[in-house]
Image (cartoon, rainbow, N blue to C red):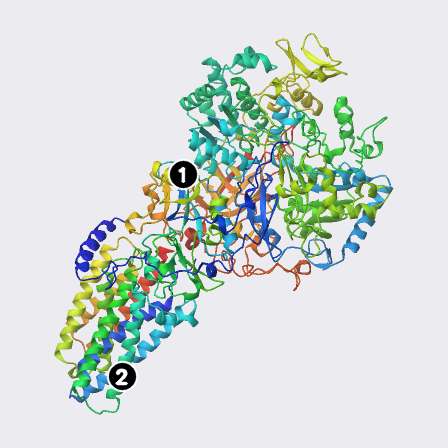
């Protein structure tokens, strides 16, 4: 490049001379015309083969590229969805989308999508299948399920989902059947961060809605909304707009140069598991400087400020620097800047801070920051807005009620002894479990449904609602804590993404019968006995509502853009037909023919016509005010009628329940907690600790946010590193490996590390390494054991932005199923051939797959990534049960 | 009941044609989060085969900070386009608003354009065996829709405007923020302007991703490590 | 992902250079009275035609759409070096065929006015064929290695050098068949090649140069050493070295140049 100047000068000289001779800049004799006088173009020919938007049909729907579920518009031409655009009427996403929206087209039209029910021939997991009819498949499944119900052991039917956005439809099925076992993956993801929120603000607000549009200062502890995060896209466009157009600042503590860290105004690499220390030091600084909002704290916090001062007395910025590596001066400065920006400031945190042994308590400290500066519910602050369904809950007053049509089967009875409990399944539990449960407080006994749904060792995993402990499902089944008769997977990738899953799934004595409902042949479906092909999100209905970062509740509908391909069916139809085959009263809850009618009924209270709603895809009351300071709303006359005021607490009681609280002589709604306050201090933690025998000095037993080290991070050796996983923005969980355009961008997951770390280990970029992960310490599942949990081989890449003690691999890749794209090969998958598109099945022909998979090893590419999950231990956080993904200590050695 | 908002996607058609004198794109590197919505959207829109790119987002390690920079790159629609000059069969032409477009009918695939482009924006489409590059989504702009990448960017990092219209807010922002193109030394007068593009990005401002150790890319690691891994 | 130009272009550049230099030799020898010179000249004309025919096949097969090759001749973009080149190549090849047809049936050299005119035109076209590929590469603004004015003289002299060497090989070792003037031209071309190649390599910056230096050594330096030593088959040796070096140079330009691009 340095030579360019001299070349240009020469060119200029030359062209000057050349010009004199009539020679142009390229040295060719001729014409004075520049390329402006260019050959004409026939636009009609140019656009002939492209999407014709004047002919294509736009249909609004809800994206399913990840769990954020933005409103989108799909364009359908000649019976095929050609493109996804954002739906500008969605007040949350405001017409924005990310790359994963187009993934819906990829997964609806890829050649190895499953279109026909399959039944296995040969041994389970052998990969041999034959095509069967729907009737045959459902008959067989019903035949296996009926006896469970008729013989009084319906709980042996286990429904295990990965991504269920039917908003209660599948629950209808499991309730109608009578099993409590609807298992999910909440704990794999975010339980650790939801528990602190629910403790502070009540069950309704397990997720916050920071007012990013109006904020001036964001302190981010390991969140990555630019690439992942529930609601990431809603946050992304607001944060960038606030930063670029209104000078908001974002400070990020992270362990790697994520996209969020990269666009932040400041990025501090932080030692994993030490976010709490930094948060405490910030609290310490704010109190020291007198920047706390004492009025707000005294009004709403249930813990005296004096006690907080004592709590954080030792948590100085210098102390935090020694622990976390973040410079003390910066911690102080950030704390002061944060407090000074209040109330237009907010914290942000997600898995980065929470997926640690001390993560729950770290998040409680982080959440305390918002309360301390009084930004909760304020303009630009940490706001809370309606989350789910429209059933007249807190903050949903005045919204039309939306609920599933038809009779609602009751919830199954809790398990226990005595009146109102199911004794039979309870008595089958191990002695130790029964004892523990019988010692629970009544509230918990009334919500206990066995070890899979409500693991007794983790009461806070189901104290507010059933978050469950998904990563223990397979170990518990293996241990015999729950017998399984029929196991049904739905959009689940457990065999790929859960530790220990495959062993259990392959064992027919543990899982006698496995039905998998999915759109493709993945690791989970490969281990099934019957595969039921599902319609994709572009081919079916769902109800949609979620928290709006624009702070006004809204609702949307997922509607089909095209009919289901081949013989695929929506999960709604599958379960309806199955219910009818099982009979015994189940069919009464699924008495509908047309899905559209079902959903029309669901939305019947909307003040717009059904046709209009379908045309827009989204409905929001344009005049409804934003959800600021919901807690300050005075109680209405009607609400006050028949209430009494409790002397000491100021609670406004009605029929034994608190409906509000007196603040300065006015009855206001308060927070949605039992005491109507923000629960900085919560006895539920020590209560749970005592109930399960967790020592009270364990950090997880503390009633107030507390700091302590992650057990296995104490005394880290020089050659010990923390192994972290992360997500890319072009992928989502384990189900995007076969989206061709996305796999093209990211198909490997190298071990990222700091170049100095690499140098110390004698590594060069691209070297192959063996990474061994050790078993966790601490009071977790098999926490007493030591040694290596597992290992894998991969190549390394250096990134200056990595924390020197952290090595990281991404999730998403390393598939051994999911077709040619997922496996990064040029050969179509043999096993499920019978389930694939037949000759006449439009429109699954795709000339890209499998021959243009250029990154395959066959074509000289790097191939796909490495599956890392088997190396990672099951590590549920005590009491809450969130999987502590980011505590893993590892060793890296050159191969 | 107050009136509901208008439905934007119902207002398209030839009467809404984007009638620019000098079409240009403004890419604000402060807003870009590297989400790839633009590049994947483009692939979907034009059914670009695997292995080809009309648009690409590069992930580059910054030399000054321990974070990444994101660089969306596409055909720069040069006012003095080397590809247009190099193509012997006059298969590359220009529309009224200045954008540079390949006429498939005249393309024999001699690849002079590919070698001529300082930005590596052109490639041979394996499916059609013709040269292919961004055309600012003519089939969309003709009926009033912004190019696919512009429409799909969630942070307004990519916008489309008329450089000859002083009233155009995108043009005004380009001027206010002193947006500049890449490789000004190549003297091609590009129509894609970048806000806050930095000098160190210059040698990396190509879609092709060079096989040179200095030209690292975090996300397309295929190109950089193929010599080591394979 | 694959670089646009492949081995076909490497071969074409080599063949075009051989054809152009060989045509120059032909023009200097085919009209001479000396029987050996005349024979050399005829062989050179034949070599020119075969080399160009093969070269044209290479060019057409390199196209992504070979069936549409005729477009290059039916459409004309005056800015494009390839557009000019295609016509020069066609004219040159046809002229070579014409010249060969003039002398095909003759048994010794003759230089009538018509024949001399044809040979002059052939010479000019030969020079054009030698020079224009440099312009094609110079026009490649996307490949830093190629986008230099020094590509024109370097590639031009390299091609001529190889072509002259091929022509000399056609004399089957009979140096008497070569006019003195042509030998002098060859020396000058070699010297110019060395100068411009060195300039090009130094100015083009810290690219991976090993292959290039081998090419230069083989193609230019080694011939000088051999000529100085004056061994038995100096002519044949230097000829082969020049050809090898020329091919290697083009292989490096096309391969390495594009590696750096893509």
Foreground of the two, A748 or A26? A26
Q: Is residue A867 left or right of residue B175?
A: right
Q: Position of residue A724 (x, y in %)?
A: 52, 38
Using the rendered image, report if marks 1 and 2 lie on a common chain. Answer: no
Callout 2: chain: C
Q: Residue furthest top?
A: A647
Foreground of the two, B106 or B200? B106
Q: Is residue A438 visible?
A: yes
What residue sits 83% from the left and 41% below the top? A588
Q: Position of residue A572 (x, y in %)?
A: 73, 45
Foreground of the two, B126 or A611? A611
Q: Is B149 rendered above or below residue A302? A: below
Quarter assignment of residue A418: top right
Tell me if mark 2 has few (under 14), some (14-19) or many (20+) residues whose alpha carbon lies within 10 angstroms of its own.
some
Quarter assignment of residue A642: top right
Q: Is A787 rendered above or below residue A216? A: below
Alpha carbon distance from label 1 to label 2 = 65 Å
Foreground of the two, A762 or C195? C195
For discs 1 and 2, the disc positioned in front in the rendered view: 1
Tell me if mark 1 has few (under 14), some (14-19) or many (20+) residues whose alpha carbon lies within 10 angstroms of its own.
few
Q: Is residue A895 visible?
A: no
Q: Tell me the residue that label 2 is attached to.
A: C98
Q: Which mark is residue A498?
A: none
Q: Position of residue A656 (x, y in %)?
A: 76, 16
Q: Is A43 rendered above or below residue A245? A: below
Q: Tell me the residue that label 1 is attached to.
A: B169
Quarter assignment of residue C20: bottom left
Q: Is residue A58 left or right of residue B176?
A: right
Q: Mark 2: which secondary structure?
A: helix
Callout 1: chain: B
Q: Mark 1: which secondary structure?
A: helix
Mark 1 in CB contact with mark 2 (< 8 angstroms): no
């Amino acid at each position: 490049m340095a030579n360019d100047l001299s070349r240009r000068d020469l060119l200029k000289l030359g062209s000057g001379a050349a010009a004199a001779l009539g020679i142009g800049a390229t040295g060719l004799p001729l014409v004075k015309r520049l390329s402006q006088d260019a050959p004409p173009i026939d636009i009609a020919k140019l656009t002939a083969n492209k999407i014709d938007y004047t002919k294509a049909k736009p249909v609004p729907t809800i994206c399913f590229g990840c769990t954020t579920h933005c409103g989108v518009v799909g364009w359908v031409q000649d019976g095929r969805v050609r493109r996804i655009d954002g739906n500008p009427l969605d007040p949350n996403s405001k017409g924005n989308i990310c790359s994963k929206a187009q993934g819906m087209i990829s997964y609806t039209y890829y050649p190895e999508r499953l279109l026909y029910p399959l039944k296995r021939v040969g041994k389970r997991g052998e990969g041999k299948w034959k095509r069967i009819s729907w009737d045959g498949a459902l008959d067989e499944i019903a035949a296996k399920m009926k006896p469970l119900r008729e013989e009084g052991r319906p709980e042996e039917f286990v429904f295990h989902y990965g991504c269920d956005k039917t908003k209660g439809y599948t629950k209808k099925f499991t309730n109608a059947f009578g099993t409590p076992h609807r298992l999910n993956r909440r704990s794999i993801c975010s339980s650790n961060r939801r528990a602190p929120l629910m403790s502070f603000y009540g069950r309704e607000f397990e997720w916050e809605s920071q007012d990013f549009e109006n904020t001036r200062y964001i302190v981010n502890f390991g969140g990555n909304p630019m690439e992942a995060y529930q609601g990431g896209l809603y946050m992304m466009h607001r944060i960038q707009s606030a930063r670029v157009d209104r000078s908001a600042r974002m400070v990020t503590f992270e362990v790697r140069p994520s996209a969020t860290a990269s666009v932040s105004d400041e990025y501090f690499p932080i030692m994993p598991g030490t976010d709490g220390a930094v948060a405490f030091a910030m609290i310490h600084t704010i109190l020291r400087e007198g920047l706390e909002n004492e009025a707000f704290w005294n009004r709403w916090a249930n813990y005296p400020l004096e006690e907080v001062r004592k709590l954080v007395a030792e948590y100085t910025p210098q102390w935090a620097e020694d622990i976390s590596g973040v410079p003390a001066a910066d911690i102080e400065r950030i704390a002061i800047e944060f407090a000074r920006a209040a109330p237009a400031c907010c914290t942000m945190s997600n898995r980065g801070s929470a997926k640690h042994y001390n993560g729950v308590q770290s998040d409680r400290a982080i959440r305390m920051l918002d309360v301390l500066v009084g930004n909760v519910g304020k303009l630009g602050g940490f706001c809370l807005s309606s989350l789910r369904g429209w059933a007249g809950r807190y903050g949903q007053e005045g919204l039309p009620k939306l609920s599933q049509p038809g009779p609602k089967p009751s919830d199954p009875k809790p398990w226990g002894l005595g009146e109102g409990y199911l004794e039979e399944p309870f008595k089958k539990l191990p002695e130790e479990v029964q004892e523990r449960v019988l010692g629970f407080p009544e509230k918990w006994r009334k919500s206990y449904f066995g070890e899979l749904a409500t693991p007794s060792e983790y009461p806070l995993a189901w104290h507010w609602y059933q978050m469950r402990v998904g990563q223990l499902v397979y170990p518990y089944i293996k241990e015999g804590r729950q017998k399984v008769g029929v196991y049904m997977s739905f959009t689940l990738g457990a065999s790929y993404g859960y530790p220990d899953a495959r062993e259990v799934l392959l064992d027919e004595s543990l899982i006698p019968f496995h039905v998998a409902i999915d759109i493709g042949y993945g690791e989970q479906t490969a281990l099934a006995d019957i595969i039921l092909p599902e319609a994709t999100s572009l081919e079916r209905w769902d109800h949609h509502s979620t928290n709006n970062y624009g702070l006004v509740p809204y609702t949307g509908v997922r509607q089909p853009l095209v009919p289901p391909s081949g013989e695929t069916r929506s999960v709604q139809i599958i379960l309806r037909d199955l219910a009818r085959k099982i009979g015994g009263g189940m069919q009464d809850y699924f008495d509908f023919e047309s899905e559209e009618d079902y959903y029309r009924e669901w939305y019947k209270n909307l003040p717009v016509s059904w046709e209009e709603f379908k045309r827009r895809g989204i409905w929001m009351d344009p005049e409804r005010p934003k959800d600021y300071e919901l807690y300050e709303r005075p109680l209405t006359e009607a609400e006050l009628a028949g209430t009494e005021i409790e002397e000491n607490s100021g609670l406004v009681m009605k029929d034994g329940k608190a409906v509000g609280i007196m603040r300065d002589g006015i009855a206001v709604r308060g927070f949605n907690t039992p005491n109507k306050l923000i629960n900085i201090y919560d006895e539920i933690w020590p209560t749970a600790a005592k109930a399960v025998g967790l020592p009270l000095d364990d950090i997880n037993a503390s009633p107030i946010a507390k700091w302590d080290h992650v057990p296995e991070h104490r005394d880290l050796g020089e050659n010990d590193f923390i192994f972290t996983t992360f997500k890319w923005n072009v992928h989502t969980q384990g189900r995007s490996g076969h989206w061709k355009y996305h796999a093209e961008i990211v198909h490997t997951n190298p071990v990222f590390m700091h170049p100095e770390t690499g140098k110390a280990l004698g590594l060069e970029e691209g070297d192959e390494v063996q990474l061994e992960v050790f078993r966790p310490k601490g009071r977790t599942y098999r926490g007493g054991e030591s040694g290596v949990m597992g290992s894998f081989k991969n190549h390394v890449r250096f990134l200056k932005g990595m924390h020197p003690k952290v090595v990281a691999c991404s999730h998403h890749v390393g598939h051994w199923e999911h077709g040619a794209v997922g496996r990064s090969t040029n050969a179509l998958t043999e096993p499920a051939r019978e389930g694939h598109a037949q000759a006449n099945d439009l429109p699954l022909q795709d000339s890209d797959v499998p021959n243009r998979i250029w990154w395959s090893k066959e074509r000289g590419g790097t191939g796909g990534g490495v599956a890392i999950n088997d190396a990672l231990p099951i590590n549920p956080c005590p009491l809450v049960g969130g999987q502590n993904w980011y505590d893993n200590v590892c060793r890296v050695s050159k191969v | 009941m107050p009136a509901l908002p208008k439905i934007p996607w119902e207002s398209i058609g030839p009467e809404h044609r984007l009638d620019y004198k000098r079409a240009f794109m403004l890419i604000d590197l402060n807003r870009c989060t590297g989400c790839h919505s633009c590049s994947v959207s483009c692939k979907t829109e034009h059914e670009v085969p695997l292995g080809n790119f009309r648009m690409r987002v590069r992930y580059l390690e910054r030399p000054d900070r321990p974070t990444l920079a994101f660089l969306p790159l596409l055909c720069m629609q040069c006012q003095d386009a080397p590809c247009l000059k190099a193509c012997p069969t006059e298969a590359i032409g220009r529309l009224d608003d200045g954008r540079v477009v390949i006429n498939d009918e005249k393309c024999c695939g001699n690849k002079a354009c590919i070698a001529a482009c300082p930005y590596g924006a052109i490639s041979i489409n394996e499916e059609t065996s013709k040269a292919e590059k961004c055309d600012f989504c003519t089939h969309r702009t003709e009926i009033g829709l912004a190019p696919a990448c512009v429409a799909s960017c969630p942070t307004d990092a990519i916008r489309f405007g008329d450089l000859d219209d002083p009233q155009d807010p995108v043009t005004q922002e380009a001027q206010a923020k002193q947006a500049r193109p890449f490789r000004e030394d190549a003297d091609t007068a590009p129509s894609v302007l970048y806000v806050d593009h930095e000098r160190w990005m210059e040698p990396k401002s190509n879609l092709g991703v060079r096989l040179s150790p200095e030209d690292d890319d975090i996300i397309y690691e295929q190109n950089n490590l193929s010599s080591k891994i394979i | 992902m694959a670089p646009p130009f492949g081995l076909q272009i490497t071969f074409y550049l080599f063949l075009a250079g051989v054809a152009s230099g060989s045509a120059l030799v032909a023009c200097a020898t085919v009209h001479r009275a000396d029987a050996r010179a005349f024979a050399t000249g005829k062989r050179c004309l034949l070599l020119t035609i075969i080399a160009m025919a093969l070269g044209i096949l290479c060019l057409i097969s390199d196209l992504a759409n070979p069936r549409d090759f005729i477009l290059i001749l039916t459409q004309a973009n005056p800015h494009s070096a390839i557009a000019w080149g295609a016509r020069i190549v066609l004219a040159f090849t046809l002229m070579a065929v014409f010249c060969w047809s003039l002398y095909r049936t003759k048994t010794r050299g003759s230089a009538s006015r018509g024949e001399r005119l044809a040979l002059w035109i052939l010479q000019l076209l030969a020079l054009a064929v030698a020079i224009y590929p440099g312009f094609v590469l110079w026009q490649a603004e996307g490949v830093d290695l190629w986008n230099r004015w020094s590509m024109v003289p370097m590639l031009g002299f390299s091609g001529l050098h190889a072509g002259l060497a091929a022509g000399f090989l056609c004399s089957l070792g009979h140096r008497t068949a070569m006019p003195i003037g042509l030998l002098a031209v060859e020396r000058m071309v070699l010297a110019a090649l060395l100068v411009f190649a060195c300039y090009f390599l130094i100015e083009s910056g810290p690219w991976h140069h090993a292959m290039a230096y081998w090419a230069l050594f083989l193609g230019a330096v080694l011939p000088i050493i051999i000529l100085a030593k004056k061994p038995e088959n100096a002519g044949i040796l230097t000829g082969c070295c020049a050809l090898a070096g020329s091919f290697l140079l083009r292989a490096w330009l096309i391969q390495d140049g594009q590696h750096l691009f893509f």
